[in-house]
């Protein structure tokens, strides 16, 4: 029988919590982290709000000053979340044999662009000859996986995905595959996205940012809210988790990756890519639509995404679409791009573990084209067996991941 | 054929097509001819001014006419990196004899590696933002600044809708993308996957490389790329795209299409380094190659050829040579070692082009020589001077990156 891959530790920093325990509480309370940004000056931008991580102090996590010097903000928040996840998994410290077979798969995004911006502004002032190019050594998003593996001394497989908003979800799926195929025995998997001027300007230029707070599925929704986050999971085989007596959050049952092949920034209106992505994940999980208890939507709150995603869910789930709660937690922690799939993966397993459906907050007016149960009146107690989580990206990249309670009540193994 | 054998063939991954846009030419005919003739594509950089930099050489793509490959409708939306990718992907599909139809488009996809993405467009966007402010940035540029844009454009141009993802991990971007693609074919989730790597030269990117002392002449001397040579003094920057088409052996047999070779094993590994540094020893390089051989079910003695990662830098080339000296020490016959980077430069995701070249080597049983190598850093079986004819059953494609990441792929006859 194929190996079952479970999640035994999680860690996150995001705009509504700086650790997983607080995140679970904030999700159930419906806290909004979308506020005025102070990471950089937004005076000249069209919008000024976002989901920013607050009160992050790298020295709370990293002892060595030289280690901090080698890291971008993205590297630091992903490393901090990794330490939380390992400790949560009872893997602190790691043994030498665990290090040899442990790998890292990260969904990246803006990487060290925040630091690159400072570098470039200095270059404009002082000229190229005097600019400190060494500041660019962590500019690319692959740096985060390198720093995690280097700091921890890991020698398993290491890789980074960059498919904008679906990268974190794909990293989780691929990490599962690496354990199933025997390339690694444990994986650190997740995503990271730092707030930075370039990304903020890009979404502003496309006029896809709501100047206030995003309102997923609302009739008057006016775009997304950008956020930053790190979201890391520890994945391992069910047998080894049981053997070590680890607490098991849940199981990755399957995932699917497709593309629209339609347009670089707009989803296919027929929602074919999204439908096929959910279908592929169901097929991979050995589940049917009847088995899905909650859909954690991509739900960016752009005019076209929310109606397209709703159409996709209705097309695939038929009448059952109206019976399944569908929520967008981006209304709380904002759209964290490269981290989104992993962050919402953590949302999904917290929902499974604690038995609740997180709400879509900021919702006021119903849209006749978005007519599903979006859980708009606060979080809801629910005994969930499975969660399907969608992540759709620029470039037409779609990834869907399905999580299950490990006791097997919702899984094909049950 | 019995039933078990059929199941086997469904899980065996073969390369059935290739396409490339490289400094050594566009398409496998020209690329193969110039590669095996031992030509060098390194020359003074023409597309931008290098006067203020300590380095002036590069391996640039010339004579690439995107309109020969890309529809006019999509051409104007695509930037240089997307054009190279889509053109290479089209050539790979044609070479594999695959037509995208309604029947196969949802099980055909792309897994692309790129180390740095569209550095030209990203800098253009960032430069306006940081010089003139956010009100003046050009929204038209935005879609092409993301690293997954080339794969997205390619899917739109060619009309396939299956798996689509972009892997970025510095100098092993292409090798790790190919490893993922092979695993997906083996898992049976896709019928055809285009995979490989793409990176482009741009002025700012070139300047950054010179400032990191990554390029020849690192410590003075004549500027040149000399992989595995005693007098090596740094890499030469290159660019280009190489894409291979993967499918199961069962699918290739059913279509009656002869594969170039099989991908029998992959290994990926990691070891601690500083952000742009190299590892202290060869331990994990060896462990990763062993991992790939174990997955292929072969031993070191069964490998006849290695396409090395060496690009002419002091540390990398010495480490890699040391690793092979140790791994193959017990083999009766040492494999021949070549590196293509003396001919095509270091384009970081050049593993895509090198995968095409290695597949051609397995098909023709010829290994190209290491261009630029005259005085080997140690006595080893490097292909020096002339190409070598050799019966290749198994060959290793090496990916070794600064930052401590390693990827090996085993190609088998």
Image (cartoon, coloured by chain):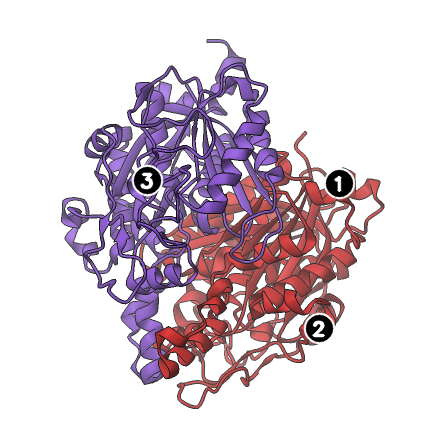
Residue A387 seen in render: no
Task: Tell me if label 1 and label 2 are in contact, CB under 8 Å.
Answer: no
Q: Which residue is mark 1?
A: A97
Badge 1 or badge 2: first in the primary sequence: 2
Chain to which the residue tagged by mark 2 belongs: A
Residue B25 sits above or below residue A226 on the image: above
Measure how far apart labels 1 and 3 are at the Cα level: 39 Å
The answer as to whether the residues below labels 1 and 2 share one chain is: yes
Measure how far apart labels 1 and 2 are at the Cα level: 28 Å
Q: Nearer the viewer, residue B377 or A375?
A: B377
Q: Which residue is mark 3?
A: B342
The answer as to whether the residues below labels 3 and 2 share one chain is: no
Q: Give residue A28's position: percent from left, percent from top.
A: 71, 71
Measure how far apart labels 3 and 2 are at the Cα level: 45 Å
Chain to which the residue tagged by mark 1 belongs: A
Near mark 3 (Cα within 10 A), the count class, few <14, some 14-19 or many ≥20, is many
Element type at mark 3: helix
**Which mark identifies residue A59?**
2
Name which residue lies at 43% across and 17% down. Answer: B393
Colour of chain A, in one word, is red
The answer as to whether the residues below labels 1 and 3 share one chain is: no
Position of the C terminus of chain B by quadrant: top left
Chain to which the residue tagged by mark 3 belongs: B
Give the label, 1 or 3, closer to the camera. 3
Near mark 2 (Cα within 10 A), the count class, few <14, some 14-19 or many ≥20, is few
Q: Give residue B105's position: percent from left, percent from top.
A: 34, 40
Element type at mark 2: helix
Judge from the rendering whether residue A220 lies leftward or rightward of residue A61; answer left or right: left
């Amino acid at each position: 029988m194929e190996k079952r891959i479970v999640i035994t530790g999680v860690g996150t920093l995001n705009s509504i919590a700086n650790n997983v325990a607080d995140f679970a509480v904030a999700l159930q309370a419906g806290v909004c982290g979308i506020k005025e940004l102070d990471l950089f000056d937004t005076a000249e931008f069209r919008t000024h709000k976002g989901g920013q991580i607050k009160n992050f102090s790298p020295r709370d996590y990293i002892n060595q000053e030289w280690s901090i010097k080698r890291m971008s903000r993205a590297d630091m928040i992903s490393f901090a979340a990794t330490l939380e996840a390992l400790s949560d998994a009872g893997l602190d410290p790691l043994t030498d044999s665990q290090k040899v077979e442990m790998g890292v798969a990260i969904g990246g995004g803006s990487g060290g662009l925040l630091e690159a911006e400072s570098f470039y502004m200095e270059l404009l002032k002082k000229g190229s000859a005097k600019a400190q190019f060494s500041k660019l050594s962590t500019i690319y998003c692959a740096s985060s996986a390198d720093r995690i593996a280097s700091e921890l001394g890991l020698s398993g497989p290491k890789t980074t995905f960059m498919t904008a908003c679906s990268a974190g979800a794909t990293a989780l799926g691929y990490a599962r595959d690496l354990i199933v195929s025997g390339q690694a025995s444990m994986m650190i998997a997740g995503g990271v996205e730092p707030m930075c001027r370039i990304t903020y300007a890009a979404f502003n230029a496309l006029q896809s940012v709501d100047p206030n707070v995003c309102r997923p599925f609302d009739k008057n929704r006016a775009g997304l809210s950008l956020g930053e986050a790190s979201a890391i999971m520890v994945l391992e085989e069910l047998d080894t988790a049981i053997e070590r007596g680890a607490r098991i959050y849940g199981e990755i049952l399957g995932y699917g990756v497709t593309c629209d092949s339609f347009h670089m920034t707009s989803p296919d209106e027929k929602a074919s890519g999204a439908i096929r992505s959910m279908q592929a994940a169901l097929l991979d999980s050995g589940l049917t639509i009847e088995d899905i208890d909650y859909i954690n939507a991509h739900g960016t709150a752009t005019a076209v995404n929310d109606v397209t995603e709703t159409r996709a869910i209705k097309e695939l789930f038929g009448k059952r679409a109206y019976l399944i709660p569908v929520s967008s937690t981006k209304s709380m922690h904002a759209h964290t791009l490269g981290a989104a799939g992993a962050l919402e993966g953590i949302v999904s397993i917290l929902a499974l573990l604690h038995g609740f459906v997180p709400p879509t907050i900021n919702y006021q007016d119903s849209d006749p084209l978005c007519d599903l149960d979006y859980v708009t009146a606060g979080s809801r107690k629910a005994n969930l067996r499975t969660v399907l989580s969608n992540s759709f990206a620029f470039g037409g990249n779609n990834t869907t991941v399905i999580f299950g309670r490990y006791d097997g009540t919702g899984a094909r193994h049950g | 054929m019995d039933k078990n054998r059929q199941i086997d063939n469904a899980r065996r991954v073969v390369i059935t097509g290739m396409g490339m846009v490289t400094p050594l030419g566009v398409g496998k005919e020209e690329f193969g001819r110039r590669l095996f003739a031992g030509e060098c594509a390194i020359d003074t950089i023409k597309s931008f001014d290098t006067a203020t930099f300590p380095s002036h050489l590069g391996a640039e793509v010339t004579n690439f006419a995107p309109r020969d490959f890309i529809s006019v409708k999509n051409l104007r939306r695509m930037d240089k990196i997307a054009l190279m990718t889509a053109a290479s992907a089209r050539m790979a599909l044609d070479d594999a004899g695959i037509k995208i139809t309604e029947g196969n488009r949802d099980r055909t996809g792309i897994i692309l590696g790129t180390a740095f993405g569209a550095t030209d467009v990203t800098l253009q966007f960032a430069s306006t933002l940081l010089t003139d402010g956010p009100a003046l940035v050009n929204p038209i540029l935005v879609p092409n600044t993301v690293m997954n844009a080339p794969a997205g454009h390619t899917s739109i141009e060619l009309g396939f809708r299956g798996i689509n993802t972009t892997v970025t991990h510095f100098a092993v971007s292409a090798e790790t993308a190919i490893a993922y693609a092979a695993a997906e074919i083996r898992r049976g989730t896709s019928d055809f996957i285009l995979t490989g790597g793409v990176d482009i030269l741009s002025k700012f990117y070139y300047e950054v490389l010179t400032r990191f002392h990554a390029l020849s002449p690192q410590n003075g001397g004549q500027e040149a790329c000399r992989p595995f040579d005693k007098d090596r003094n740094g890499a030469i920057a290159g660019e280009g795209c190489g894409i291979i088409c993967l499918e199961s052996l069962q699918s290739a047999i059913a279509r009656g299409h002869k594969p170039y070779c099989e991908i029998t094993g992959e290994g990926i590994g990691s070891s601690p380094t500083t952000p742009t540094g190299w590892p202290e020893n060869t331990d994990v390089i060896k462990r990763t190659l062993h991992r790939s051989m174990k997955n292929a079910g072969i031993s070191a003695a069964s490998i006849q050829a290695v396409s090395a990662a060496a690009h002419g830098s002091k540390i990398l080339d010495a480490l890699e040579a040391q690793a092979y000296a140790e791994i193959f020490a017990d083999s009766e016959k040492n494999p021949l070692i070549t590196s293509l980077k003396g001919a095509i430069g270091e384009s970081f995701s050049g593993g895509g082009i090198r995968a095409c070249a290695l597949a051609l080597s397995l098909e023709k049983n010829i290994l190209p020589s290491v261009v630029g190598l005259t005085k080997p850093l140690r006595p080893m079986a490097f292909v020096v001077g002339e190409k070598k004819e050799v019966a290749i059953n198994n060959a290793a494609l090496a990916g070794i990156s600064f930052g401590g990441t390693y990827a090996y792929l085993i190609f088998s006859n």
